[in-house]
Image (cartoon, helix red, strand yellow):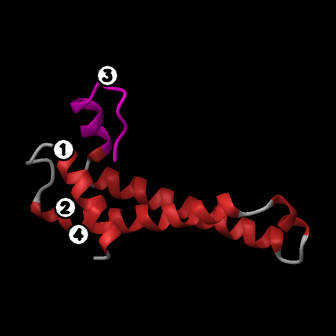
Amino acid sequence: MPEVQQELWHQIVGRLPHDWFRKEHLELLRAYCQRVCVARQLAKEIERFQPDWLREDGGLERFDMLTRLLDREHRAMTMLARSMRMLARWSRAHPRSGDTPP
């Protein structure tokens, strides 16, 4: 696992109770960390995208591709989080903290 994904793994595991994840969740958590890192890279590419590039040949198509890829990553992240019951368990564990899930 690349270092950036390892750091995210440790951040997530460190913020949650020690028994939050079961053994069978570890591969899902690895995939979740991978998806989060890919989504962050795509978001950076979208942020760097200049509006003028939309008028260039292929500009709109590239922007559309980036936003579709980011949407796909977000859907995969949500599915993985639900599979590990992170979203429901997070809201029960932090009902009014204002903190957001990792």
- Of the two numbered discs 2 and 1 in the rendering, the one whose residue sits closer to the viewer: 1
Residue depicted at x 73% and y 63%: 49
Q: Give the range drawn in magenta.
A: 87-102
Q: Does the magenta stretch include residue 84?
A: no
Q: Which mark is residue 16?
A: 1
Q: Is residue 98 magenta?
A: yes
Distance Cα–Cα, label 3 vs label 1: 16 Å
Please tell me whether residue 99 is drawn above or below residue 21 in the rendered image: above
Quarter placement of the N terminus? bottom left
Q: Residue 27 carries which label?
A: 4
Query: Horizontal and vertical percent for residue 33?
Result: 34, 63
Label 3 neighbour load within 10 Å: few <14, some 14-19, many 20+: few
Point out the tag, 2 or 1, that comes first from the N-terminus.
Answer: 1
Label 1 neighbour load within 10 Å: few <14, some 14-19, many 20+: some
Residue depicted at x 26% and y 53%: 11
- Of the two numbered discs 3 and 2 in the rendering, the one whose residue sits closer to the viewer: 3
Query: Horizontal and vertical percent for residue 73?
Result: 50, 63
Q: Name the residue under label 3.
A: 96
Q: Is residue 27 left or right of residue 53?
A: left
